[in-house]
């Protein structure tokens, strides 16, 4: 396994692999790898000749009051995990090589970036879109793998590749959960035992919403949101949003759930902001 930190050096190496007709599967991460990331790596291993994992805590996607400084960075452990999974290349750039002092160019996906998580985290998706675009230019993957836990992110990244004509196939993979239902996230490391229990209410409420829509045939958005609130309000510290949106376009569903939708929640447990979602199709 090779580890690169310099964008130009990895670009050259990828160019050589492409000349040898090797296909490149890419798993972009911010490190602190968990089973969710491992599932993406395993899928990439199955579908490509070469697997590249990037480990980069991207400063451009953190707001000034967010957890950039405290974000977990267990680099040695991450490298070991990648080696064990048969990753071929790790790209772990320094912030100054991705964003040198004279850096000026940012990517903004209009409309999609300003809603849901984008409302509570202004600039977040501009940072994600910019770094993913840069990483695609550096790694030039044939396929790139993203977890559906970050549902809005995956829709935005698909839009970038479509709008900017990137020859990259975006593969979205299911959210990996604890047995309890809790969605895996690097930020779960911030939660105490008690908070971990409280956090379960989020996945519980999504499961309940799915059951109400698919089995009990309840369609009004306001009823579903009410049921979710009943479960999460008593145990979370702040609800950023509970939203029901078209699963493909993220257009808001205001009245009745009449198509495949994503129900997405962002809520604080203690000081930790958690997100989760479920895709539901009324029968
Ligand atoms: O999902 C993440 O870990 C990050 O947002 C990503 C896609 C690696 C960009 O920094």
Image (tube, rainbow, N blue to C red):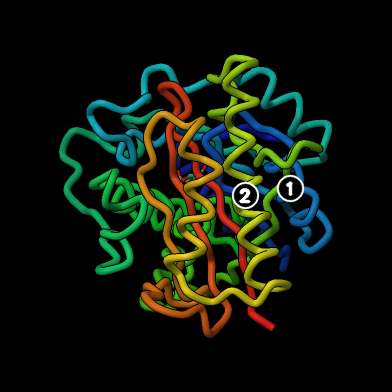
Marks 1 and 2, Cα distance to the nearest angstrom?
6 Å
State the image coordinates of residue 193 (x, y, percent, origin top left).
Answer: 65, 15
Camera-nearest residue between 137 and 183: 183
Q: Secondary structure at mark 1?
A: helix
In this view, 192 is above or below 262: above
Q: Is mark 1 within 8 Å of ligand 1?
A: no
Camera-nearest residue between 76 and 273: 273
In this view, 74 is above or below 109: above
Query: Label 2, on which residue?
Result: 27
Relative horizontal placement of residue 171, taking residue 11 as reference (left or right): right
State the image coordinates of residue 149 (x, y, percent, origin top left).
Answer: 58, 51
- Going 39% across and 41% down the picture, which residue do you hit? 239
State the image coordinates of residue 136 (x, y, percent, origin top left).
Answer: 48, 58
Name which of mark 1 and mark 2 comes first in the sequence: 2
The label shown at residue 41 is 1
- Going 52% across and 58% down the picture, which residue do you hit? 151
In this view, 31 is above or below 168: above
Q: Quadrant of the N terminus?
A: top right
In this view, 283 is above or below 97: below
User: Which image quadrant for residue 177?
Assistant: top right
State the image coordinates of residue 157 (x, y, percent, origin top left).
Answer: 45, 63
Instruction: Tell me if I can see residue 5 in this picture.
Output: no
Relative horizontal placement of residue 180, taking residue 204 as reference (left or right): right
CB atoms of marks 1 and 2 within 8 Å: yes
Q: Secondary structure at mark 2?
A: strand
């Amino acid at each position: 396994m090779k580890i690169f930190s310099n964008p130009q050096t990895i670009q050259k190496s990828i160019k050589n692999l492409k000349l040898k007709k090797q296909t490149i599967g890419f798993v972009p991460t911010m490190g602190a790898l968990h089973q969710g990331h491992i599932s993406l790596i395993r899928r990439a291993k199955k579908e490509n000749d070469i697997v590249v994992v990037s480990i980069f805590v991207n400063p451009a996607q953190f707001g000034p009051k967010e957890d950039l400084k405290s974000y977990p960075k267990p680099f040695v452990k991450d490298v070991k995990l990648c080696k064990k999974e048969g990753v071929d290349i790790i790209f772990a750039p320094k912030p100054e090589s991705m964003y040198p002092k004279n850096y000026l160019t940012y990517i903004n996906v209009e409309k999609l970036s300003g809603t849901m998580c984008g409302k509570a985290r202004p600039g977040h998706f501009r940072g994600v879109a910019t770094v993913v675009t840069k990483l695609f230019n550096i790694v030039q993957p044939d396929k790139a793998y993203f977890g559906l836990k970050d549902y809005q992110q995956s829709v935005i990244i698909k839009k970038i590749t479509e709008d900017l004509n990137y020859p990259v196939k975006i593969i979205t993979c299911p959210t990996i959960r604890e047995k309890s239902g809790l969605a895996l996230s690097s930020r779960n490391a911030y939660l105490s035992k008690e908070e971990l229990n409280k956090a379960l209410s989020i996945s519980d409420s999504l499961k309940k919403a799915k059951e109400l829509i698919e089995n009990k045939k309840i369609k009004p958005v306001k009823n579903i949101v009410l049921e979710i609130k009943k479960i999460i309000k008593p145990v979370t510290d702040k609800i950023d949003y509970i939203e029901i949106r078209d699963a493909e376009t993220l257009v808001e569903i205001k009245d009745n759930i009449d198509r495949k939708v994503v129900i997405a929640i962002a809520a604080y447990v203690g000081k930790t902001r958690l997100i989760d979602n479920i895709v539901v199709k009324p029968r």
